[in-house]
Image (spheres, rainbow, N blue to C red):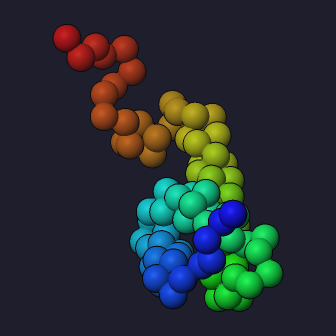
Amino acid sequence: MRRRATDEDVETSKMMFYGGFAFLPWLWLINFVQYRPYVKEDDTPEDMKYYVRGSMYGFLIFMALWGVWLAIFYANLESPWAQGLLLFEKGDTMF
């Protein structure tokens, strides 16, 4: 039997949700994975359900945008703006 969500759980979920907006999307993922079972419970506060679902959507949107950016970056790898973002020039070795 699962324990009920406490006020501390709600506060932690809220902090992780807002922390994800500081370009820390892994907080959204952890928030969703950790508190996902509580979303299905009827006695879970609506605030917590909002934060957990919002974390899931935020993480998915961030990953979709990051995937699009990566596709554009690698499609234009020879362009000057993409070359300026690389740490090493093409063909260089570290040793």
Compared with residue 85, is residue 29 higher up or lower down, i.e. above or below? below
Locate the C terminus by quadrant.
Answer: top left
Residue farthest toward the left in the current orientation of the protein: 95
Compared with residue 82, is residue 41 higher up or lower down, i.e. above or below? below
Compare residues 53 and 81 and report the one nearer the observer. Answer: 53
x 31%, y 28%: residue: 88
x 63%, y 34%: residue: 75
Residue 14 in view = no
Locate the N terminus by quadrant.
Answer: bottom right
Compare residues 47 and 29 and report the one nearer the observer. Answer: 47
Percent x, y of residue 57: 70, 67
Percent x, y of residue 36: 67, 64
Residue 48 in view = yes
Percent x, y of residue 54: 66, 74
The part of the image, by quadrant, that contains residue 80 is: top left
In the image, is 50 to the left or to the right of 34? Answer: right
Compare residues 78 and 23 and report the one nearer the observer. Answer: 23
In the image, is 70 to the left or to the right of 15? Answer: right
x 48%, y 72%: residue: 16
Percent x, y of residue 38: 68, 71
Marker count (numbered): 0
Compare residues 11 and 56 and report the one nearer the observer. Answer: 11
The part of the image, by quadrant, that contains residue 94 is: top left
x 58%, y 42%: residue: 70
The part of the image, by quadrant, that contains residue 84 is: top left
Compared with residue 28, is residue 66 higher up or lower down, i.e. above or below? above
